[in-house]
Image: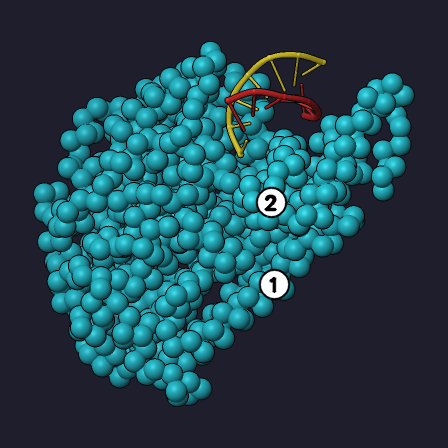
Chain colours: A cyan, B red, C yellow
Amino acid sequence: MALQKRLDYGFNGYQVPPTPRAARSVRRRSLFKKKADDHQMCAFDLLATVAGKLLLDGESPPSANTSSGKERPATVGNSVGKEEKDENKSLEEKSCDRDCYERNFLFTEIVSEAPNPNSCSNELACTQNDIISRPASGITSSDCSEKIGSAEQLVNDDCKLSLGISTPSVDIESSGFRLSANSGSEDESRKDIKLDSANIRNLSISNKVSMCSSGHPEASDRKSSALVCSVDSVKFPFFRDHTPCGSFPVNRENVKLVTRDDDDNSSECIEPSTRNKAFKPPGDRRFRKFLAPKHCKITSNVKDDEGCNNAERSNYLNRKNAFKRQRSLRDYPFKKRKLYDCSSVSNSDESITGDGMFELSENGTNEDGLGSGPTLPGVNAAPTSVPGGYASFHSRNSQVKLRIKSFRVPELFIEIPETATVGSLKRMVMEAVNTVLGGGLRVGVLVQGKKIRDDNKTLLQTGISHDSKMDTLGFTLEPSPAPSPITSYPEDCPGQLLCDNPQPLARYPPAPSITQSAGQLGGHQDTHPDHHGSFNNFIESDHDSAPSPPGMSLQRTTSNSKALVPVPSLKQDALAVLPLRKSKRSESTQRRIRRPFTVSEVEALVQAVEKLGTGRWRDVKLRAFDNAKHRTYVDLKDKWKTLVHTAGISPQQRRGEPVPQELLDRVLTAHAYWSQQQPKQQLKSQPDTCLLL
DNA sequence: GTTAGGG
DNA sequence: CCCTAAC
C-alpha cells in the first residue's frame, strides 16, 4: 500500500534524466503503459447501478437498521448472475431492470433530523474505535474532539450533510482471482474470492439507505426539510455469470492481491502484512462526513497508513534481492517490482493470505497498485473487461478471471436539505463512496428510473422530498471519468512524532491524522479538486486529483486519465472504462504522496540539526522523526536543504505554509554553524556537537 | 545503508 | 520528492 501512495502531481511533468538508468526506466514505463492500456478495461468499467428506495417516515424500518456492518445478503445475489449475460445491454437498461439488479440503495429507514440515536451510537462507536486503534498520543484526543465538533456541527448547521460509513467491507468473489480478505476484526472470517475478470462487467451496488426527514427535537428550528439518509450498507456486487454468493465483509485495507502474469511474470500485490498492527482499526472502518453548503468535512478512519514503512524499507531490499524475487517478491513493494520484469515467477496462482488481503490471480497484468489498501483491490487491479466487452481480452494471456461478488459499504449517513441540489446529493454520496472505495466512482441519481442529469436541480424540483415517496430514488455508481485517487491518506503514523521523542518535540501537534486531514478538507479536496467545481454530468472529475492513493492510481501514469474522458450519457454509465488500472501502474514507480512539512516538523528538524549538525541525517531521523515513517532521512536532508534556501530568500518568494521567521533564523544559524564546524570536525575528529545548544 | 547534490 | 553517485 505504501508504495501506492503518491501524488500524481508531477507526473506529467516528470522528466526522466538522460542517464542510462533513466532510459531503462523510461522504457519500462512505456512498456508498462502499453500494457496497462491493453488492460484498461477494468473491473471498474463495471458500472454499478443502484436502485434506490426511500422510505418515508412512516415506512422507515426500525432504526436498528442503521447499524451497519450487518450483512445484507439479500441484496446480493442474483443480480450478479444475471447481469452480464448481455454485454450489449446498456447499463442504464440494466439498471432499470429491477429483477436483474438488486443493488439498490434502499432507503429503508428514516431518521429524524436530529441525531439519530442509532447514529449517535454509531458515532460513538466510531470514535471509540478510533481511539482504540490509535497509538497513544495526542491524536486521540484531537480526533475525539474533532468528531464531537462535527457532530455538533451537524446539529447546528442547517445545511449539512453527514455521511457515516462504517466498516466498509468488501465482498468479493472471484474465480480467477483469489481474493481473500478479512475484515479488520479478528473474528471476521476470511474468504477467498475469485475474480473472473472476463466476467466482470458491472459493478453493482446495493445498499440500504435510510433516508428520513424530520426535525429533531433539539433542532426544531432547523429546517425540517432536511433529509437524512443513512445507508446501512452498500454492496457492490459486480460480476457476471456468477452464482450468487453470500457477501462477506472485507476490509479493504487488508486486502491482498496476488496476480499472475503469464507473459513475463507474476506479480503480487500485497499489502505488507507486517504493518503496524497498532494502527489497524479494530474492525470497522468508519467514514464520517459532514458537509455543509460551503464546508465539507470528511472524517475518515480509514487508514492505510501502515505499510509505508515496509514499503520504504523494502525498496532497498528489492535491488539486492532481485534474484530472490520468486521467493520473496511478495514482500516487496510494487514499486520496485517492475525491476523484475523478467522474472520467472510461475504462473500458478499465488495466494497470499496475510492480513486479510485479497488475492488476485490473473494472467497477464496487473501488478501494482493493488497493494494499496484503501482502494478496491480486486477491482482495480484486475484488468478486466472493458466497456466494449471482452474484446480486448482476446489475448488469452491477458485474461483475468475475476469475480467480485459485492462490495459493501456499511453505513452512510446523509443529511441534506431539500433545497440542496441533486448535484450536491450526488456529490455527497459519491464522496462517501469514493472515500470508502478509494475513488474512481461517481454517483448518478435515478428518480423513477430516470436519470437526473441536471445537477443543479434541487431535490425538491426533482421530486425528492421528505414527504414524497422515495422508492423510486436510485443511485448509480459509475466509473468516474478519471481515476480518482484514494482520498485522504491517513498519515502513516499519526502522532508518531510525539512518541518516542523525549526531546522538545512535545510541541508537535499530533501528526496529521486522518481526522485532521479530513477536517481540513485539504486532503480530500486535494484529491478531488474538481468535485466542488463543476460536475455537470459528472459529479466528479478527478483528473487533477492530486494524491493518488497508494496502490490506487496507476491510472494516471498509464494515460488513463486522458483516455477516460467522460463518455456521453447512457453508455457511459454502463461501461465507461474504469480508469483504475492499478494493474500496470505498479511498475512505474509511484511517486510518494507529497506531504508538506508542518511547522512542527520543521521545528523538530531544526532542533535536531542544531544538536546533531548536518551530515548526520540518519541520526536526525532517528532522533526526531523516528516515528514518522514517511519521513526518511533523505527527506529530512532535502527539507533542510529547502529550509536553508527558503531562509535565504525574501518572504514574498516563499511558498507553501509559511515557516516562522524564527525557525528560519535558526536554520541559518545552524547551517552556518555546522558549515564551519564540519571542517573542524574532520580535523579534530569529534568536536562537541552540542555547542550551540 | 548513508550522504550529498542535482533534478 | 526522486535519482544517482560516491562512499
User: Residue at left 53%, top 58%?
Assistant: A515
User: Residue at left 49%, top 40%?
Assistant: A593
Q: Quadrant of residue A268?
A: top left
Pick the quarter of the image with the C terminus of chain A: top right
Q: Subunit of mark 2?
A: A
Name the residue carrying label 1.
A142
Residue A686 placement, left or right of A86: right
The x, y position of residue A196, in whole percent, is 27, 38
The x, y position of residue A305, in whole percent, is 54, 46
Q: Which mark is residue A651?
A: 2
Q: Is residue A603 above or below residue A447?
A: above
Query: Closer to the N terminus: mark 1 or mark 2?
Result: 1
User: Residue at left 13%, top 42%?
Assistant: A87
The x, y position of residue A398, in whole percent, is 27, 26
- For label 2, the crowd category at 10 Å Cα-Cα, with few meaning under 14, some 14 to 19 and many 20 or more, is few
Q: Amino acid at mark 1?
A: Ser
Q: Nearer the viewer, residue A552 or A358?
A: A552
Is residue A94 in sight in this rendering?
no
Q: Is residue A556 above or below residue A478?
A: above
Q: Subunit of mark 1?
A: A
Helix, strand or loop at label 2? It is helix
Q: Nearer the viewer, residue A560 or A284?
A: A560
Q: Nearer the viewer, residue A383 or B2?
A: B2
